[in-house]
Image: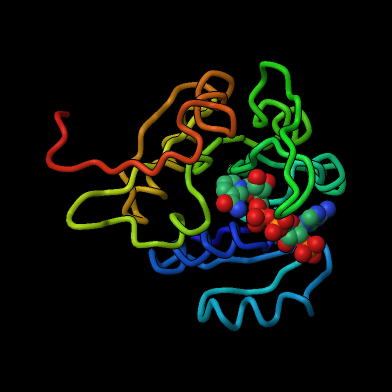
Amino acid sequence: MEIGTIGAGPFAQAFAKQALKAGHRVKLSNRRGLESLREIVDQLGPGAQAATKEEAAACEMVLLAVPWDNVPETLASLSGWDNQILIDAINPYHGGAGNFTPADVGNLSTSQLVAALAPGARVVKALNNLTVRNLEADPIVNGARRVAFVSADDDGAKKQVETLLGGFGYSVIDLGNLRDGGLIQQAGGPLAGRDLFEQGERYK
Ligand SMILES: NC(=O)c1ccc[n+]([C@@H]2O[C@H](COP(=O)([O-])OP(=O)(O)OC[C@H]3O[C@@H](n4cnc5c(N)ncnc54)[C@H](OP(=O)(O)O)[C@@H]3O)[C@@H](O)[C@H]2O)c1
């Protein structure tokens, strides 16, 4: 599958590494444009491509990985979502690396706000519990599978992201809808930053 990323920082790059390992192609985009992405896609290797935001957003699945403060301007510049799955891994923080302060999003998940700003996209909240270091590490450690959580209001889209992340090697757990599941996994929730593993057989 071809997957786009809006944002090409450490989080999108770690995601791209897992996607490429699983045999997908990844179109990465950022704010500064194609030239600034050259080194990143070279390091990621075959299957990674520098793209415009519009090209990345036209992929069947799209990872949104920009800072919370940049979400409104980013989504305002991308209209015409046509049923693409938009994976939201955003934590509600103001500021940048080393200078984070929590953003007040009331009792909403960031994904509900993202969904309102991206009409036509099918938003799935995922991967909020993983730091960059954990996201780029091997999802299977000593036979145990690292846990990834998904939440969405669209069950079909959630299933597709579950299949994608299962293909990366994760044990995927469905946390329910965008609001309740989103709040559980995003920063401030009980599963934020928790690096969990599942061992052994699952009861089906
Ligand atoms: N880091 C983590 O451990 C972690 C874990 C879970 C979730 N997350 C979430 O993942 C998101 C990204 O994290 P990060 O650490 O990779 O952030 P980052 O280092 O700040 O990178 C942000 C990326 O977004 C791009 N961007 C900003 N505004 C844009 C716009 N208007 N249009 C297109 N691209 C734009 C930037 O492009 P330029 O470089 O061209 O400015 C950059 O590539 C954050 O929301 C964070 O909460 C991070």
Towards the viewer: 43 or 196: 196
Rendered location of residue 32, percent (x, y): 84, 68
**Residue 61 vs residue 120: left or right?**
left
Whether 79 is drawn above or below 177: the answer is below
Rendered location of residue 202, percent (x, y): 16, 34
Whether residue 165 is visible to the viewer of this picture, yes or no, is yes
Q: How is the image coloured?
A: rainbow
**Residue 25 vs residue 168: left or right?**
right
Rendered location of residue 70, percent (x, y): 81, 46
The residue under the point 48% across, 67% down is 17
Whether residue 54 is visible to the viewer of this picture, yes or no, is no
Task: Report the number of discs.
Answer: 0
The residue under the point 57% across, 74% down is 48
Whether 97 is drawn above or below 104: the answer is below
Image quadrant where residue 23 sits:
bottom left
**Residue 201 vs residue 16: left or right?**
left
Towards the viewer: 134 or 77: 134
**Residue 157 vs residue 5: left or right?**
left
Whether 101 is drawn above or below 204: the answer is below
Rendered location of residue 124, percent (x, y): 55, 36
Image quadrant where residue 153 sits:
top right
Farthest front residue? 98
The residue under the point 52% across, 81% down is 45
Image quarter (top left, top right, bottom left or bottom right) of the C terminus: top left
Ligand 1 image position (quadrant): bottom right
The residue under the point 80% across, 43% down is 75
Towards the viewer: 137 or 32: 137
